[in-house]
Image (tube, helix red, strand yellow):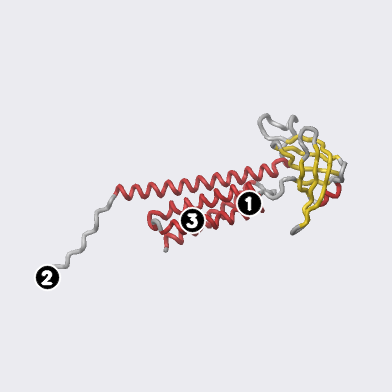
Amino acid sequence: MNAPAKAARPPLDRSRLAGTVAASGLLALAGLATAVLGFSWFLDANDAALGYRSAPVCGTAQHATGTDCVRRETGKVTDRYTVSGDGTTYIVKVAREAAPAHRYEVTGNLYTAAEVGTDVDLTLYRGRVAELSSQGHRSGTLGTPWLPSLKVSLLAGLGATLTILGLTWSRAGTRAASFALAMGGFTAVTAMLGCLGLITTSLPVAALLAVPVLGWLAMTVSATVIVRDS
């Protein structure tokens, strides 16, 4: 008795498979490149916030031509006040000889020392006043880095979305899209919160970068595994 004939498998469309693999690879590479750009912006934001602490004074022997440096100026406090909310915010207004007067958020100790009419020492870095000091008290002037954190978090979220899509599209197809978008949004929110805390943190570059990179990889790999196993 003859065995029942097996159903013939449809012919493998190699060109379509190659196109799918190529598209998936491009998506994953685009995602990784986007994430790397985000990490680069993160380091730039940290340097913009705290680089003045280690930068040489302009025009000294330690300053190499074409590199960042700090300049010193003296300003005068023309006004000061506090703003009450969740906590007390201390504001001083400082007049400069070569630039218009500007308001800066400072620490409570500097606010106490910098009375109206008092001279304060200014540290300028990358064209902005990075630090105020008076009577031994110092205060950075950056405040909360909302905009840099937003930029970095958007790149981190987009990078995660593209990477997850690239690594799962060949198996999950359009089913991966909604999950990848949701995970990208979660990554962006997490990155935003992390940046707000880390951008103004004084850590070695390796340690500073390890936290967001490892966090991003953990979320992206976990999401990829979930999609591919579902």
Q: Nearer the viewer, mark 2 or mark 1?
A: 1
Say which residue label 3 marks: 181
Q: Which comes sooner in the sequence, label 2 or label 1?
A: 2
Tell me if 117 is positioned left or right of 60 in this view: right
The residue positioned farthest toward the left in the image shown? 1
53 vs 107: above or below: above
Disc 3 to disc 1, C-alpha distance:
21 Å
Residue under the point 37% across and 49% down: 21
The residue at the point 78 percent across, 46 percent down is: 139
Secondary structure type for disc 2? loop
- The three-letter code of the residue at mark 1 reads Cys
First in residue order: circle 2 vs circle 3? 2
Instruction: From the viewer's perspective, tell me whether residue 213 is left or right of residue 200.
Output: left
Q: Residue shown at 51%/57% (left/top)?
A: 183
Tell me the quadrant of the picture where the N terminus can be found: bottom left
Of pointers 3 and 1, the one earlier in the residue sequence: 3
224 relative to 201 in the view: left or right:
left
- Residue at mark 2: 1
Disc 2 vs disc 1: Cβ atoms closer than 8 Å?
no
Towards the viewer: 17 or 143? 143
Marks 2 and 3: which is nearer the front? 3
| On-image quarter of the C terminus | bottom left
User: Distance from label 2 to label 3 (Cα)?
Assistant: 56 Å
Amino acid identity at mark 3: Leu
Q: Which residue is mark 1?
A: 195
Looking at the rendered structure, the kind of residue marked 2 is Met
Give residue 98's quadrant in the image: top right
Residue drawn at x 49%, y 53% is 161
Q: Position of residue 178 (x, y in %)?
A: 45, 58
Residue 25, percent across and down?
41, 48
From the image, state whether disc 3 or disc 1 is nearer to you. Answer: 3
Is disc 1 surrounded by few (<14), some (14 to 19) or many (20+) residues within 10 Å?
many
